[in-house]
Image (cartoon, rainbow, N blue to C red):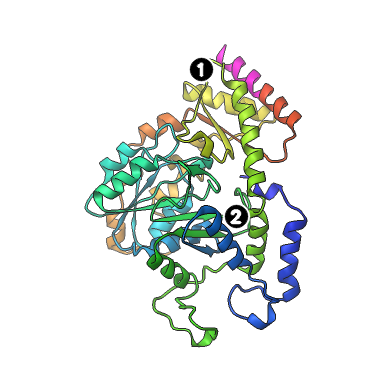
Amino acid sequence: MPGYELWGDNEKKHLNDVIESGILMRYNFESLRNNHWKAKEFEQAIQKRMKVEHVQLTSSGTTALLTALNAAGIGAGDEVILPTFTFVASFEAVLSVGAIPILVDIDDTLTLDPKSVEQAITPRTKVIMPVHMCGAMADLTALKEIAKKHNILLIEDACQSFGATYKGKYLGTIGDLGCFSFDFVKTVTCGEGGAVLTNNKKYYIHTDQYTDHGHDHIGNNRGAENHPNLGLNYRISELHAAVGLAQFERLDEILSIQRENKKILKNALKEIEGVSFRKILDEEGDNASFFSIFLTTEELARKASLALSAKGIGNAYWFDNNWHYIKKWDHLKLVKTLAPLYKEHKELLPNYASADYSKSDAVISRTVTIPISLLWTHEEVQKKSNIIKEVLSEILNK
């Protein structure tokens, strides 16, 4: 996700505002900061654009997930349903609050399969966590119905889909809480950063407190503030927020370039027999940071991935990826932690190593994904689309 590819004078201006004031912390120091409040400004900008009541910036997407879970009171022994295809931070966050990651299958949306979610619900289930992978959405209509039916929370991991929408609403604003990442390779970057969004005032107060050691942020004397609850330091700095604010001001430009480039690639492959496309439930809402295709077999997908790489076309074959798919998560399967888990916690974990994820395997093993760059010229996109078409046609016609 190439937000970092666009960098210019606006980012430098916002950074210089902070550097010239010398105040790098987002709280207090009112008289010294020359009225620069980059974190507040960024939060307000997201809030206004995405029409959400509350936004809390964090130090990363991972800490956003941890903050959301804590804000909602998710902890010891609670089950959180999430997909087999995600980034490792999703299940790391669940484990870190003492909860139980329940991994369920995906479908051709490359996100949670609602039928698999329904089958996985138990009396311990407290959260469904759809992960909007590669810029596009899970079936939030079905998942919201399931969550409502069972009186459980919907927490959106929208870290890979900033700016994407579903039926006119921004991903991250549809569930009870939503989480974003602004790390170096996200749609919009802070260098490092994240955010939690919610329309629930209680959850927002919890996020505001939890990310700053439990401070209630009442008054203007930090030393006199109360601590209603325990918290941690998940604050974003003014420097990181300044970069994110500048990048956010370019969101329309970023999305427009991605969508146009993806459209060209997709149009080039429409007529190739044996190639199908990821199911996008709201095409207009796709943020278009990735272009995912399905081949008919695992063997063909592997060949396509290798052949594209040999021709200089960057791509991801997720089935063999260490970060994003259950197949290579040996540290989870073997529960490798630096500090031991409580015996009771460990005993509640499923046997991830022996679980049947064949339905997910059948999808991911046939998937090849091409990242969309903001820096491609029109001529470069056309050239790449022709190369991809030639490579796939040759493989499929052998």
Viewer-side residue, 385 vs 89: 385
State the residue at coordinates (47%, 44%): 132
Relative to 389, 214 lies left or right: left
**Earlier sequence position, callout 1 versus callout 2:** 2
Instruction: Report the Cα–Cα distance between label 1 and label 2.
Output: 36 Å
Q: Main secondary structure of the magenta part?
A: helix
Q: Residues within 10 Å of mark 2 (few under 14, many from 20)?
A: many
Quick check: marks 1 and 2 in contact, CB under 8 Å? no
Q: Quadrant of residue 146?
A: top left
Viewer-side residue, 32 vs 2: 32
**Circle 2: residue type:** Asp
Q: Is residue 338 visible?
A: no
Q: Determine the secondary structure under disc 2.
A: loop
**Circle 1: residue type:** Gly
Number of numbered callouts drawn? 2
Residue 9 lies, in percent from the top left, at: 78, 56
Q: Quadrant of residue 386?
A: top right
Q: Which mark is residue 274?
A: 1
Q: Residues within 10 Å of mark 1 (few under 14, many from 20)?
A: some
Quickly name the residue at label 2: 183
Q: Determine the secondary structure under disc 1.
A: loop
Residue 101 lies, in percent from the top left, at: 35, 52
| Extent of the magenta region | 388-398
In this rendering, the answer to whether 119 lies above or below 50 is above
Quadrant, the N terminus: top right
State the residue at coordinates (58%, 28%): 305
